[in-house]
Image (cartoon, rainbow, N blue to C red):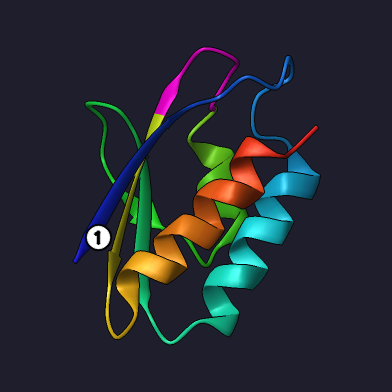
């Protein structure tokens, strides 16, 4: 299992485009992935609607948990998607 935390820097938070890119990457991986606001309930990260439902804004910390083969590489790729979203 791999866990990553990231503070969202995008002024509009996680909006539709990065949520879609993130969910597509999760779906393409063979891993089980959840995403949550720090201290909140985790949701399946393969669902755009679940990600958008978290209401993640600039300054929020997200927690990504990845289980499966090559979990560390998958977690790093997913963090990169959110870190580079604009």
Give the residue displayed 29% in from the left and 27% down from the top: 38
Picture coordinates of residue 82 (x, y %)? 61, 42
- Percent position (x, y) of residue 20? 72, 57
The residue that disc 1 covers is 2
- Region of the chain picked out in magenta, as a range: 56-61
Q: Residue at x 32, y 72 (%)?
A: 71
Q: Which residue does the image show at 48% across and 35% down from the upper left? A: 54
Q: In the figure, 33 relative to 16: above or below? A: below
- The one nearer the camera, 44 or 84, is 84
* Residue 5, image quadrant: top left
State which quadrant residue 86 falls in.
top right
The local secondary structure at tag 1 comes to strand
Q: Is residue 60 magenta?
A: yes
* Residue 74, x across and y down, in percent: 45, 69
Q: Nearer the viewer, residue 55 or 86?
A: 86
Q: Is residue 5 magenta?
A: no
Prevailing SS of the magenta stretch: loop
Q: Residue at x 72, y 46 (%)?
A: 18
Mark 1 burial class by Cα count in 10 Å: few <14, some 14-19, many 20+: some
How many circles with numbers are drawn on the protein?
1
Residue 22, percent from left and from top: 62, 58
């Amino acid at each position: 299992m791999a866990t990553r935390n990231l503070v969202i820097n995008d002024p509009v938070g996680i909006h539709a485009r990065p949520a879609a890119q993130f969910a597509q990457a999760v779906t393409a991986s063979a891993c089980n992935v959840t995403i949550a606001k720090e201290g909140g309930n985790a949701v399946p990260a393969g669902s755009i609607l679940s990600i958008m439902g978290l209401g993640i804004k600039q300054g929020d910390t997200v927690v990504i948990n990845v289980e499966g083969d090559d979990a560390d590489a998958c977690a790093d790729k997913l963090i990169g998607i959110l870190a580079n979203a604009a």
